[in-house]
Amino acid sequence: MDAESAAAAIRSAGFVPELYAQEGWADSAEDKAFRTVVESYPRPDTPWPQGATVALGLAVPDGWTVVPSIEGLPNAEAILKAYGLHAKEISVYGPVEEDQAGFMLPYRQSPRPGTAVRKGSTVKYRAWWEKS
Protein backbone atom coordinates (compact mmCIF):
# COMPACT_ATOMS: atom_id res chain seq x y z
CA MET A 1 0.00 0.00 0.00
CA ASP A 2 1.32 3.48 -0.75
CA ALA A 3 2.18 5.84 2.12
CA GLU A 4 -0.63 8.33 1.54
CA SER A 5 -3.36 5.65 1.45
CA ALA A 6 -1.97 3.92 4.54
CA ALA A 7 -1.72 7.17 6.51
CA ALA A 8 -5.30 8.12 5.54
CA ALA A 9 -6.60 4.71 6.64
CA ILE A 10 -4.80 5.01 9.97
CA ARG A 11 -6.20 8.51 10.57
CA SER A 12 -9.74 7.39 9.72
CA ALA A 13 -9.39 4.52 12.23
CA GLY A 14 -8.58 7.05 14.97
CA PHE A 15 -4.80 6.66 15.14
CA VAL A 16 -1.83 8.94 14.36
CA PRO A 17 0.46 7.76 11.52
CA GLU A 18 4.22 8.23 11.86
CA LEU A 19 6.32 7.49 8.77
CA TYR A 20 9.93 6.33 8.85
CA ALA A 21 12.45 5.03 6.30
CA GLN A 22 13.30 1.39 5.70
CA GLU A 23 16.53 1.84 3.75
CA GLY A 24 17.44 -0.71 1.10
CA TRP A 25 13.86 -1.85 0.44
CA ALA A 26 13.84 -0.02 -2.90
CA ASP A 27 16.64 0.02 -5.47
CA SER A 28 16.04 3.60 -6.62
CA ALA A 29 13.44 6.38 -6.58
CA GLU A 30 12.08 4.87 -9.81
CA ASP A 31 11.58 1.44 -8.20
CA LYS A 32 7.93 0.35 -8.02
CA ALA A 33 8.41 -0.34 -4.27
CA PHE A 34 9.54 3.26 -3.54
CA ARG A 35 7.41 4.79 -0.72
CA THR A 36 5.27 1.69 -0.23
CA VAL A 37 4.60 0.49 3.31
CA VAL A 38 6.77 -2.54 4.07
CA GLU A 39 6.09 -2.84 7.81
CA SER A 40 4.02 -1.35 10.60
CA TYR A 41 4.06 -1.25 14.37
CA PRO A 42 1.91 -2.41 15.86
CA ARG A 43 0.84 -5.14 13.43
CA PRO A 44 -2.67 -4.57 12.00
CA ASP A 45 -4.33 -7.21 14.21
CA THR A 46 -2.88 -5.88 17.50
CA PRO A 47 -5.27 -4.12 19.95
CA TRP A 48 -4.12 -0.48 20.21
CA PRO A 49 -5.58 2.51 22.10
CA GLN A 50 -7.45 5.13 20.07
CA GLY A 51 -5.35 8.22 19.36
CA ALA A 52 -2.06 6.30 19.69
CA THR A 53 0.71 6.40 17.10
CA VAL A 54 1.07 3.72 14.44
CA ALA A 55 4.53 3.59 12.84
CA LEU A 56 4.78 2.85 9.11
CA GLY A 57 8.06 1.80 7.51
CA LEU A 58 8.41 3.04 3.93
CA ALA A 59 10.63 1.44 1.29
CA VAL A 60 13.43 3.81 0.28
CA PRO A 61 16.81 3.25 -1.40
CA ASP A 62 20.03 3.39 0.60
CA GLY A 63 21.02 7.00 1.20
CA TRP A 64 17.41 8.19 1.46
CA THR A 65 15.25 8.98 4.48
CA VAL A 66 11.71 10.12 5.31
CA VAL A 67 11.27 13.66 6.63
CA PRO A 68 10.01 13.59 10.24
CA SER A 69 7.49 16.03 11.66
CA ILE A 70 9.27 18.75 13.64
CA GLU A 71 6.39 21.21 13.89
CA GLY A 72 5.96 22.39 17.48
CA LEU A 73 9.05 20.54 18.74
CA PRO A 74 11.83 22.43 20.56
CA ASN A 75 14.68 20.17 19.36
CA ALA A 76 14.11 20.34 15.60
CA GLU A 77 17.78 20.55 14.61
CA ALA A 78 18.73 17.47 16.65
CA ILE A 79 15.79 15.47 15.25
CA LEU A 80 16.66 16.36 11.66
CA LYS A 81 20.35 15.58 12.25
CA ALA A 82 19.38 12.11 13.53
CA TYR A 83 17.61 11.53 10.18
CA GLY A 84 20.69 12.70 8.24
CA LEU A 85 19.07 16.03 7.32
CA HIS A 86 20.05 19.70 7.68
CA ALA A 87 17.88 22.34 9.34
CA LYS A 88 17.26 25.82 7.92
CA GLU A 89 15.30 28.05 10.27
CA ILE A 90 13.51 31.05 8.81
CA SER A 91 13.16 33.42 11.77
CA VAL A 92 9.96 35.45 11.85
CA TYR A 93 9.90 38.68 13.87
CA GLY A 94 6.69 40.61 14.19
CA PRO A 95 3.00 39.90 14.47
CA VAL A 96 2.01 36.40 15.52
CA GLU A 97 1.07 34.28 12.52
CA GLU A 98 -2.13 32.26 12.79
CA ASP A 99 -0.42 28.88 12.40
CA GLN A 100 2.71 29.53 14.46
CA ALA A 101 3.40 26.74 16.93
CA GLY A 102 4.67 28.84 19.85
CA PHE A 103 7.62 31.01 20.73
CA MET A 104 10.74 29.70 18.89
CA LEU A 105 8.97 26.48 17.80
CA PRO A 106 9.03 25.25 14.19
CA TYR A 107 6.00 25.50 11.91
CA ARG A 108 5.37 25.44 8.13
CA GLN A 109 8.11 22.93 7.43
CA SER A 110 9.17 22.05 3.90
CA PRO A 111 9.40 19.36 2.68
CA ARG A 112 6.34 18.10 4.55
CA PRO A 113 6.58 15.20 7.01
CA GLY A 114 6.51 11.81 5.28
CA THR A 115 8.31 13.06 2.16
CA ALA A 116 11.15 10.78 1.01
CA VAL A 117 14.37 12.75 0.38
CA ARG A 118 18.06 12.06 -0.02
CA LYS A 119 20.07 12.20 3.20
CA GLY A 120 21.87 15.52 3.43
CA SER A 121 18.81 17.42 2.17
CA THR A 122 17.70 20.59 3.94
CA VAL A 123 14.39 20.96 5.76
CA LYS A 124 13.22 24.57 6.02
CA TYR A 125 10.85 25.76 8.71
CA ARG A 126 9.62 28.98 10.22
CA ALA A 127 10.10 29.91 13.88
CA TRP A 128 8.45 32.93 15.47
CA TRP A 129 10.48 35.21 17.73
CA GLU A 130 9.45 38.24 19.76
CA LYS A 131 10.21 41.55 18.17
CA SER A 132 12.76 43.41 20.32
Image: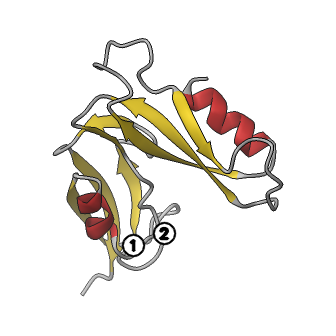
Q: Amino acid at mark 2?
A: Ala
Q: Is residue 48 above or below residue 61?
A: below
Residue furthest out toward the bottom: 132
- The kind of secondary structure element at disc 2 is loop
| Rendered location of residue 17, percent (x, y) | 62, 48
Position of 40 compared to 44: left or right? left
Q: Amino acid at mark 1?
A: Leu
What is the CA distance from the residue labelled 1 to the residue labelled 2? 6 Å
Q: Quadrant of residue 86?
A: bottom left
| Rendered location of residue 24, percent (x, y) | 32, 31
The residue that mark 1 highlights is 105
Image mark for residue 101: 2
Q: Nearer the viewer, residue 14 or 60?
A: 60
| Rendered location of residue 80, percent (x, y) | 29, 59
Q: Quadrant of residue 112?
A: top left
- Pointers 1 and 2 in contact (CB under 8 A)? yes
